[in-house]
Amino acid sequence: MRSARGELEQEFRSFAQQRGIYYQVRYLDERGREVVRVDFDGEQASIRSRNRLQDKSGHYYFEESVGLLPGRVFVSPLDLNREQGKIEVPHRPVIRYATPVRFSDGRKAGVVLTNVDATQFLSAIGEAWLVDEKGYYFAHPDPEKVWGSERDLGTGEGLRKDNPEDISQLLGRQGGQLETASRLITYQSLQVPASDRYWTVLSVRQSDELLTSVTEFRINFGAILAGALLVALLLAWFLDRRISRPIEYLTEQADKVSMGNLLNPIDLRDATEIGRLGEAFERMRVSMVRAIEHRRRA
């Protein structure tokens, strides 16, 4: 067991180092205890020592994912990471992707869990606003307004508080513009990959900035709309290329393990990044099989 777990630790570290977007990569056993954990600080991936591994059995992301059918993926809300039950400081926004794994006889073996570091795309939003489906801010020019939901800082700050009369027009729609007496709001909805959640990007400008002349208004309006759409497209591209595709591959391999197809090697024969990712998954598959089989015989 010790040798198999050591191999899995090395494979997780290699995976996190190679990808660069995963704040944590973990394997939790069927009771929610961390068996292997790798942390990435933005430069170096490191293996968490075994005496510092934690029990995550009471956390919602474990409870939601451990009972999933083989091959399914749980996608958490975007929220602030917690360590030992407390919000990490400085704040670390993460999205968690989790998929269950099983022994060859169908019994639960635990969960493979990745924490995606959301600061990488939140920092690219600039002066725009980004809100969840309830209107709480993920990004805002005023840092005091972000993370106001009950699952984060609980301040209640959000679009619903700042714009109660406009909330129904700004949330739950694909995109458009809303003009009030004092400002112009351009908004675009984004579907979070592999989930039923959506976010909304908003670009807000004061009307006196835009209405100095008809010509200036048209120019600025076009720039605002193009900027909002560009942010939406960049976010969608980032989430698809940097998050969804690697998770889809990880899900496929977890599905093979859960269905007992442990002897089929992964051979993509692709010279691109996907090919290298496939090689990493193959090493990870072998290590997971060894770790799980050792636990089964123990």
Image: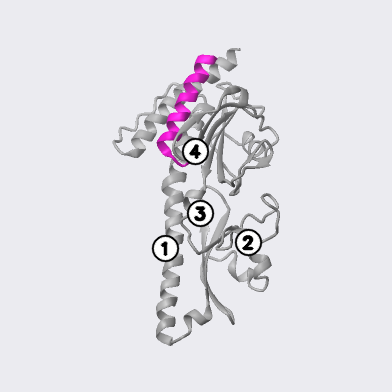
Within the magenta stretch, is there residue 132? no
Q: Residue at x 56, y 38 (%)?
A: 98
> Residue 294 vs residue 274: left or right?
right
The reply to whether the C-beta atoms of the residues labelled 3 and 2 are less than 8 Å apart is: no
Specify which label sits upstream in the sequence, 3 or 4. Answer: 4
Distance (Cα) linking label 3 and label 2: 16 Å
Q: Of discs 4 and 1, which sits in the foreground?
A: 4
Quarter of the image where the C terminus is located:
top right
Where disc 4 sits, the SS reads loop
Q: Of discs 3 and 2, which sits in the foreground?
A: 3
Disc ID at residue 122:
3
Q: Amino acid at mark 3?
A: Leu
Residue 82: tell me if it is visible. Answer: yes
- Which residue matches tag 4? 41
Specify which label sits upstream in the sequence, 4 or 1. Answer: 4
Percent of width and height locating residue 275: 34, 35
> Residue 65 vs residue 286: left or right?
right
Distance (Cα) linking label 1 and label 2: 21 Å
Q: Of discs 2 and 4, which sits in the foreground?
A: 4
Distance (Cα) linking label 3 and label 4: 17 Å
Residue 14's place in the image compared with 166, above or below, is: above
- Which residue matches tag 1? 230
Number of disc labels: 4
- Which residue matches tag 2? 135
Toward the top, the furthest residue is 298
Where are the magenta residues, as a range? 1-23
Distance (Cα) linking label 1 and label 3: 14 Å
Specify which label sits upstream in the sequence, 3 or 2. Answer: 3
